[in-house]
Amino acid sequence: MAWLYKQPESKLWWIGYRANGKQVRRSLGTKNRKEAEKELAKVQVMFQAQKLGRLHEELYQSLTGTGSGSISINNLVGIQKRLNIFSDSLVR
């Protein structure tokens, strides 16, 4: 699970999440809530993909912008929907 918040006296958005039992908090470097929400969505997709065993290098690089391409918000929503469908099929 990940969340957005602002530090007291700060105009920048921060993201927090737990990874490997440790709480991680980092500045997103933006004052724009919509931009912060896009970053939150990326982190949530990565956690969901990891949980389902579907996080691979290409997806990670697309989400983080570290590979040859980046991912649009529309593609991100599509990935999240496919992961939800995959997750639902595992439960049945």
Image: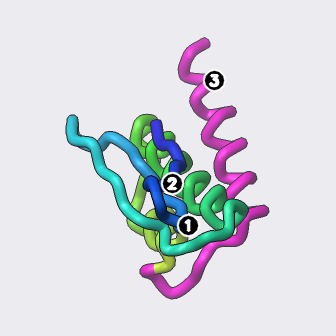
Furthest toward the front, the residue is: 9
Dot placed on the residue nearer the N-terminal end, 1 or 3: 1
- Number of other residues with Cα within 10 Å of mark 1, as a class: few under 14, some 14 to 19, many 20 or more: few
Task: Using the image, determine if residue 22 lies above or below residue 28.
Answer: above
Task: Using the image, determine if residue 78 lies above or below residue 57.
Answer: above
Image-based side of 43 in relation to 77, left or right: left
- In this figure, which colouring scheme has been used for the structure? rainbow
Judging by the rendered image, the residue that carries numbered circle 3 is 88
| Distance from Cα at disc 2 to Cα at disc 1 | 7 Å
Q: Nearer the viewer, mark 3 or mark 2?
A: 2
Q: Quadrant of residue 34?
A: bottom right
Q: Nearer the viewer, residue 53 or 66?
A: 66
Extent of the magenta region: 66-92
Judging by the rendered image, the residue that carries numbered circle 2 is 6
Q: Quadrant of residue 88?
A: top right
Furthest toward the left, the residue is: 21
Dot placed on the residue nearer the N-terminal end, 3 or 2: 2
Task: Using the image, determine if residue 53 lies above or below residue 68.
Answer: above
- Number of other residues with Cα within 10 Å of mark 2, as a class: few under 14, some 14 to 19, many 20 or more: few
Judging by the rendered image, the residue that carries numbered circle 1 is 11
Magenta residues: mostly which secondary structure? Answer: helix
Circles 2 and 1 in contact, beta carbons < 8 Å = yes
Q: Nearer the viewer, residue 54 or 45?
A: 45
Furthest toward the top, the residue is: 92
- Residue type pointed to by label 1: Lys
- Residue type pointed to by label 2: Lys
